[in-house]
Amino acid sequence: MENKITEFLLQVDHPEINQKFITKKNIKLLDIKENEINLSIELNFPYKSQTNLYEKIVKDGIEKITNLKTNIKWSTKILTRQVQKSVNSIKGIKNIVAIASGKGGVGKSSTAANLALALSYEGANVGILDADIYGPSQPKMLGISKKPNSKDGKSMEPIIAHDIQAMSIGFLVDQETPMVWRGPMVTSTLEQLLKETNWTDLDYLIIDLPPGTGDIQLTLAQKIPVTGSIIVTTPQDIALLDARRGLKMFEKVNIPILGIVENMSTHICSKCGHEEFIFGKDGAAKICQDYNAELLGSLPLDIKIREHLDAGIPSIINNPESEISLIYRSIARKTALKIANLAEDHSSKFPNIVIQQS
């Protein structure tokens, strides 16, 4: 009977993505008694809002096989995943997710903000780093107007907003001050913001990258331990061309592509309900097919997304049960599951070996 139950668990499909989500390592206890079964499952991604759904899927399946009452204890343990070789991990951060776009104006920053908040909503400890040095937008989107504190004069404390930790160059300069900096200064600032911020026990750090494939993206690949990347695009042909460049860039630097998010996929008239594909149709789906990538979600062109961000209260916070928020939450869960299925990082378990010459 134990083998039957284990075999069933390993074949359970995730309800939102074409992927199994329980492994042998996730099964922490399987105790079969005469009248009942006690099961303990520890998943490696946040799923707070889906606990009842997972419970029903697993419980109904086991009870159908065994005709025994099944009690399930669920828990979460998010692990650190492998990153690029020769890049050291950063204290206080388990996984870094880069949010990128080939061009500006496709909703990358709004996706980064709502994705960070959605992961937090599902039960993870989350931070967001605004790496768009030339045009930082997270302070406005998260409703933050104060400057970060420093306890020792050497490092900064992240600002807490909506239960996530945040850092941005926008916290340190006047919002109307232009950042007239050359590439080396920009990349140096990014490293400082990342490594001199006292991040605390983050399961995920979301990095909102500037658009394009320039100096900052290269620095990210060479010096920062990135777990995976998400490409944001619209269905428009020009945006899709740039999205393909972004995909190829991350492939070249060996950073896993977790998936693609399509913004402005459709517009529904608030007056008459007519649906119109203003920027084209199924563009992101075509890229996913060409690159064997996952379409994490598609968001409509909705005035509420803009209104919520302008007010500093993103959609996830304004109404976590709205249609828009449900899409963001689904994207967050899919992203976390994709990360959970990457190889685990064991580097911290090995001692540093120093060779000294006599």
Image: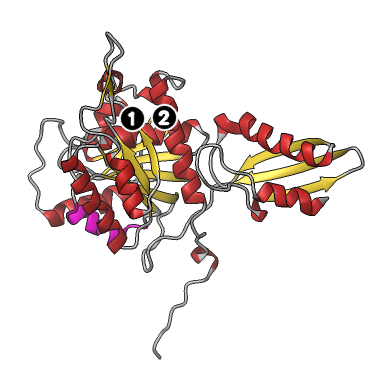
Residue 134, how many percent across, how many down?
Answer: 15, 42
In-front residue for pair 270/23 = 270
The residue lying toward the viewer, choosing from 83 and 39, is 39
Magenta highlight on residue 87: no
The answer to the question of whether label 1 and label 2 lie on touching residues, with beta carbons closer than 8 A, is yes
**Residue 80 is at least partly visible in this image:** yes
Mark 1 / mark 2, whichever is N-terminal: 1
View extreme (right): residue: 34
172 sits left or right of 326 in the view: left
- Can you tell which quarter of the image residue 198 is in? top left
Using residue 77 as the reference point, say whether residue 32 is left or right of it: right
Which amino acid, by three-letter code, is at mark 2?
A: Ile
Give coordinates of residue 347: x percent, y percent. 49, 66
Describe the element under mark 1 as helix, strand or loop: loop
Q: Residue furthest bottom?
A: 358
Please name the residue that numbered disc 2 is placed on. 327
Residue at 37% across, 68% down? 86
Dot 1 alpha-carbon crowd within 10 angstroms: few under 14, some 14 to 19, many 20 or more: many
Please give the name of the residue rendered at 22% of the width and 40% of the height, measured from the top-left corner: 169
Is residue 217 found inside the magenta-colored segment of the image? yes
Q: How is the image coloured?
A: secondary structure
Point out the stretch of residues depicted in magenta. Answer: 213-225
- Residue 41, which numbered label? none
Q: Quadrant of the C terminus?
A: bottom left
| Residue bearing the label numbered 1 | 299
Q: Using the image, determine if residue 136 lies above or below residue 199.
A: above
Amino acid type assigned to the residue bearing label 1 in the image: Leu
Query: Mostly what secondary structure, the magenta segment?
Result: helix
Q: Position of residue 227 (x, y in %)?
A: 40, 54
